[in-house]
Each structure stands twice: as structure tokens, then as C-alpha cells.
Image (cartoon, helix red, strand yellow):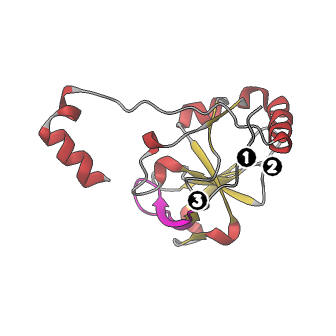
Amino acid sequence: MKRLTQQVHEFKRYEGGCHCGAVHYSVDLDLIGSRKAICNCSRCEMLGFLHCHASTAEFKLESDESSVAEYRFGTGRARHLFCRTCGVESFYYSRSDPDLVDINLRCLRGVDIYSLDYWLIDGRNWERAQGARREAEEDARVPILWRLLAPRSRYANSRAGQAFFDSWH
């Protein structure tokens, strides 16, 4: 059984927010050593949410709190926050870790989401998945990690496509 070795933490400040810019924040994240996840619950699948937790001390909402609206469902413990103008959910407070901010990696500037490894979370069977998560954390086994596949097209492989990609990242 393979064990996790001591991780090197590389915290970096990232800027994030919604599509229209009404919601914006800064967050210090360790994208190398932290757990990033893809959840298969109905909400995360519809949104394409890519999860990474940060402590509340590492997160600073730069915009006015009036720019966000809240949505709760099911148990009502998760606080889903989204932009009142464009509707994008760039962060929220989850029911599994309510003391942490769950950041949507798709909403951070300068992050190549295709270069990161992700845990798969069985959000459809949330209670069972949380039990398995706690066991894995206690056992310290290396999980099976997944990567997103970057979309490919003739344009993406062209000189103009590469110039656009370079300017974006």
C-alpha cells in the first residue's frame, strides 16, 4: 500500500470571481498540495464546479456582500452563493466543510484546470462518500487521481488559437 509522503506547500494568491465582475475575491491556495475534486451530484454536474477548499482566513471577498445571493436546498447546511447579476457561483460554503470556502477553480484567473489532478467525489451518494473520504484521510493512501481532457480543435492547434490561449493564461 502506497503512503502519502510529506507534501511541499506552495501557496499563491489568486484572483477570482463571476462572469460580469460584480463578485470578485482573492484567495491564497496551494494548488499543488491541496485536494481538488470533481463531484457528480446533480448541482455540481450542471455547473461544472471544480472544487478546492480554502480557509476563511485565506479568502477575502473584495466586492460588496450585496452583490451575492444565497441558495440553499436539501439539508440547508450548504450556503451556495452566486452573483446577483450574472448568476455565476464562483465559491460557496459546503455542508461537508462549513468552516472552509469551496472555490470553483474555473473562476480563478491564471489557473490551467487541465494541468491539475482531481479526486472524484460521489456526491450522488453523499453520506457514503463522506465516510469513504474520512477513511482515506485516516489511512493516508494515495487516491486514484483524474485529469480533465483539454478540448482540441483545428483552431486550438493553429497559430491564432495558440496566441489566444497564451494571452488567456
- Mark 1: which amino acid? Arg
Under mark 3, the amino acid is: Asp
* Residue behind mark 3: 30
Residue mark closest to the camera, 3 vs 2: 3
Query: Considering depth in this image, is 1 or 54 the residue closer to the camera?
Result: 1
Amino acid at dot 2: Arg
Tell me: 40 left or right of 12.
right
> In the image, residue 21 lies at what x, y percent?
41, 61
Q: Distance between the residues labelled 2 and 1?
A: 7 Å
Numbered tag placed on residue 84 in the rendering: none
Label 2 sits on residue? 77
Q: Which residue is drawn at 63% across and 52% down?
A: 34
Separation of marks 3 and 1 at Cα, in angstroms: 28 Å
Magenta highlight on residue 16? yes
Mark sitting on residue 72: 1
Q: Is residue 112 above or below residue 58?
A: above
> What crowding class fits label 1: few (fewer than 14 Cα within 10 Å), some (14-19), or many (20 or more)?
few
Q: Nearer the viewer, mark 2 or mark 1?
A: 2
Magenta stretch contains residue 73? no
Residue 9 point in image, percent of width and height: 61, 61
Are the residues at dot 3 and dot 2 in contact (C-beta closer than 8 Å)?
no
Choose the circle earlier in sequence order: 3 or 1.
3
Q: Is residue 94 visible?
A: yes
Q: In the displayed structure, does residue 72 sit left or right of residue 62?
A: right
Residue 88 makes an appearance in the image:
no
Q: For the residue carrying disc 2, how many other residues have a C-alpha within 10 Å: few (<14), some (14-19), or many (20+)?
A: some
- Image quarter hosting the N terminus: top right
* Residue drawn at (63%, 69%) of the image: 58
Span colored in magenta? 10-27
Which element type, helix, strand or loop, lies under badge 2? loop
